[in-house]
Image (cartoon, rainbow, N blue to C red):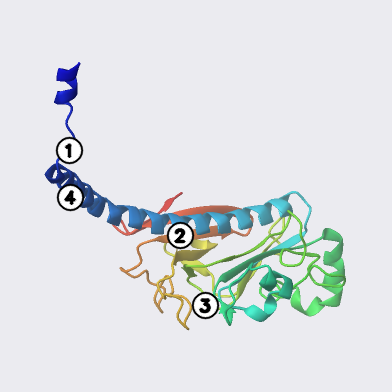
Amino acid sequence: MQALVRKIKGFTVFEVLIVMVLVGIVSGLAYPNFSEWRKDRAVKNSAIKIRGLFLNTTAQVQRGLYGFAQVYINPSPTDIEEISEEDKEAGEIPNEEEVKAIRFISRGMKQNNISTQRSVKAEIWNDPAERCLMEGGGKEGSFWDDDGKVNDKPEVGYFDLEDIALNISAEAAVCFSKDGSLYGTNGNFINDSEYFGSSVWAIYICEDKSAKTDDYATPCVDDKGNIGDEIKYLYALSWSRFGNITLYKYDSTEEEFVVQ
């Protein structure tokens, strides 16, 4: 037994140093790949969440709950003044002058309210952009019966996303109806592009590289709508007037969008 005990040895300092150097080298090689994967995953998760809002909105239209429904997008910074004092005291938001995030809201109009609004706002119904009215709802007498920002209902939703950018720099909205007759868009969505065609609309979703500067977000495309070489993590969400929501990832090597 004593002979066996004498044969047990620990690691020398030199051996420990060698192991630490090897671990450091392997970690250094693996970190860039992990970092790239993490950034791509963050953008993809945001794109999936946006797709979910679109899918839920069009589903409520097809089920007949709403005769007319909207997805509203505001890529401008959110004023801290919009947030309640209760939320501030609860620490739900950062105590800054403004919260820089892209806001997404879904809104719905019941079938029996469409005829009322056609009468009250007759001047807007023949214009696809104007009838997709970008104003809040959810209260008695509102244009929209339900508003995800106001009403706590599963049929409508509301959330803010940070650290992503879009191809639009001003508020925009898209409105759906069951048969597509009331379809309309308001804002600069992508349409009639070489990737998606003339009967499909889309938005680009990418990483925000602005580091939260005053400009808020670096656009996913240049002024001419071209995808820049520096954009590594780019997704596109497309839809038709009847829904058909599809999420794509851009393959910069092949210069094409791949369905996710």
Tell us which disc is closer to us: 3 or 4: 4
- Nearest to the observer: residue 240 or residue 253: 253
Q: What residue is shown at x 66% (from left), y 74% (from top)? A: 129
Please tell me which of labels 1 and 3 falls first in the chain. 1
Report, in whole angstroms, how far the alpha carbon at label 2 lies from the one at label 1: 45 Å
Q: Which mark is residue 21?
A: 4
Please tell me which of labels 2 and 1 falls first in the chain. 1
What secondary structure is found at the residue carrying circle 4?
helix
Q: Position of residue 197 (x, y in %)?
A: 48, 61
In this rendering, position of residue 78 left or right of residue 152: left
Name the quadrant of the N terminus: top left
Report, in whole angstroms, how far the alpha carbon at label 3 lies from the one at label 4: 48 Å
Amino acid at pointer 4? Val
Which residue is label 1 attached to? 11
What secondary structure is found at the residue carrying circle 2?
helix
Q: Which mark is residue 43?
A: 2
Q: Is residue 115 visible?
A: yes
Amino acid at pointer 2? Val
Which residue is label 3 attached to? 169
Q: Position of residue 163 (x, y in %)?
A: 47, 67
